[in-house]
Image (cartoon, grey):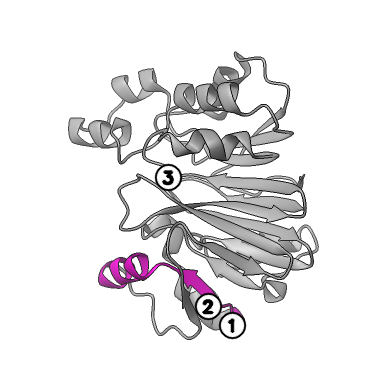
Amino acid sequence: MIAISLQSGSNGNCIYVEAAGKRLLFDAGISCLLAEQRLAAFGKTIRDCDALIISHDHADHIRYAGVFQRKYGLPLYVTPFTLGAALLKYRLGPLGDVRHFRAGSVLHFGNLSVRTIPTMHDGADGAAFVVSSHSKRLGILTDLGYAFSRLEEVVSSLDAVFLESNYDPEMLERGPYPGFLKRRIMGPGGHLSNTEAAELLRRYGKRLKWACLAHLSETNNRPDLALRTHKMGKPDYTLYAASRYGATEILTV
């Protein structure tokens, strides 16, 4: 199994995963042009993808879903509530092959499966994902809300993970955001901090080969700070930080 974060952050999210002869895109928060250019650098193309799977209705995850669906003919997997909420807020345009799922169900693509996990983030009907192929398991865990108890079992089962590590608590507290936005980010519908994400992995990431820190805030975090916080737990796995402005290397599970 291989994975590439094409971009990660409030300015747009998209992850490519390939395993068992199947190719999946998770989220469509960046333009087709950027996604194609970044995949082409690895000899990959969206035209070979088998599906586009959407996590939730916020613009940085779904704003280009209609364009991706029409341009590449990708089946669009999305929960009914997520799509309904997005259609009220954004101009997604006409959609063709839409396949609804319920957060908590399992999607099957040949010998590759995607377990969908309901999240506590303040989207309409958010989901995180565990991609499984044979004995390998990759987590795509962003926009979680908080470290709810089900994450313990999920993280314990993973060989690799994209995990949100959104903000540094001191930077957020001292930063320019208004009080209501700070409370939203720190609250049960917001994001995991560097400290919360690091503690989750320290306690339950015993099986991990690598972890890629994702969805870092531009204003309230820095890649070096996020990595330093996670390294304090002296992990046995390799750490990466996904960029807001480009793709990671190919990460192998």
Rendered residue at 60%/13% (across/down): 232
Q: Tag 1: residue type? A: Gly
In terms of depth relative to the viewer, which is nearer, 29 or 132? 132
61 sits to left or right of 7? left
| Residue 59 higher or lower than 84, as above or below | above
Q: Tag 3: residue type? A: Asp
| Residue range (magenta) | 72-89
Rendered residue at 67%/15% (across/down): 234
The residue wearing badge 1 is: 73
- Asked if residue 73 is among those painted magenta in the image, a careful observer would answer yes
39 sits to left or right of 87? right
Q: Residues within 10 Å of mark 2 (few under 14, many from 20)?
A: many
Q: Tag 2: residue type? A: Gln
Q: How far apart are the alpha carbons under marks 3 and 2?
A: 23 Å
Residue 20 is labelled as none
| Residue 39 higher or lower than 72, as above or below | above
Query: Is residue 224 in view?
Result: no
Q: Residues within 10 Å of mark 3 (few under 14, many from 20)?
A: many
- Asked if residue 241 is among those painted magenta in the image, a careful observer would answer no
133 sits to left or right of 125? right
In terms of depth relative to the viewer, which is nearer, 112 or 174? 112
Discs 3/2, front? 3
The residue wearing badge 3 is: 143
The residue wearing badge 2 is: 69
Q: How far apart are the alpha carbons under marks 2 and 1?
A: 5 Å
Residue 140: percent from left, percent from top: 57, 47
Q: Is the magenta stretch mostly helix, strand or loop?
A: helix
Q: How far apart are the alpha carbons under marks 3 and 1?
A: 27 Å
